[in-house]
Image (spheres, rainbow, N blue to C red):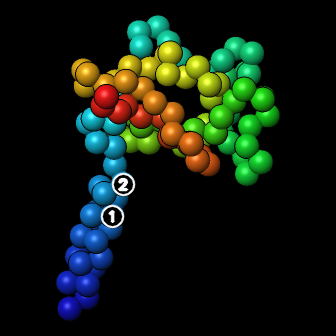
Amino acid sequence: MAWRIRGLLGAVALVMLTSCGVTDDEAVRLKEGQTLGEAEAGGLEYCSTLGCRYERQLCLEVFFEYGRSPALCLFDNVCEKLECEKEGGRCAIFDGFPGQVKCIRD
C-alpha cells in the first residue's frame, strides 16, 4: 500500500512540474555572441524583494526552451539580445513582478 501512495505522489509531482514548463512557441534563445549580463551592472544579478538597483533594470524571468530562468535584473533592451526558438514570433516583455520575457505570435 505504501508503494502505491509513493507512486501516486510521484506522478502528481511530475504532472505539476511539467505543467509549469515553457511551450515551444514561448521559448527564446540568445542571439549569437550575446549575453544577458551587462558590464556596467557587473554581470547578472538576481532580483530582491525590493527589485533591482539600476533604474532601467526590470525584474524578469526569461522563458528558455529548457525552462524559466530565476528572476533576474535585466535592462529593458533584453529583447534585442534574444530571438525566438520558432520562426514567426517576436520577443515581448510582460509586466508583473517578476515580469516575463517570452515569444508571442503576431
CB under 8 Å between discs 1 and 2 = yes
Q: Is residue 100 left or right of residue 47?
A: left
Mark 2 residue element: loop
Residue 104, given in percent of the width and then of the height, sits at 35, 33
Q: Considering the image in quadrants, where does the N terminus appear?
A: bottom left
Q: Is residue 44 left or right of residue 69?
A: right
Amino acid type at image mark 1? Met
Residue 5, given in percent of the width and then of the height, sits at 26, 84
Q: Quadrant of residue 72?
A: top right
Amino acid type at image mark 2? Cys
Q: Is residue 44 visible?
A: no
Q: Residue at image x 47%, y 8%?
A: 33
Q: Nearer the viewer, residue 48 or 91?
A: 91
Instruction: Quickly name the residue at label 1.
Output: 16
Q: Quadrant of residue 42?
A: top right
Instruction: Name the mark on residue 20.
Output: 2
Residue 50, given in percent of the width and then of the height, sits at 77, 48
Q: Is residue 49 left or right of residue 74?
A: right
Q: Is residue 42 left or right of residue 90?
A: right
Q: Is residue 87 visible?
A: yes
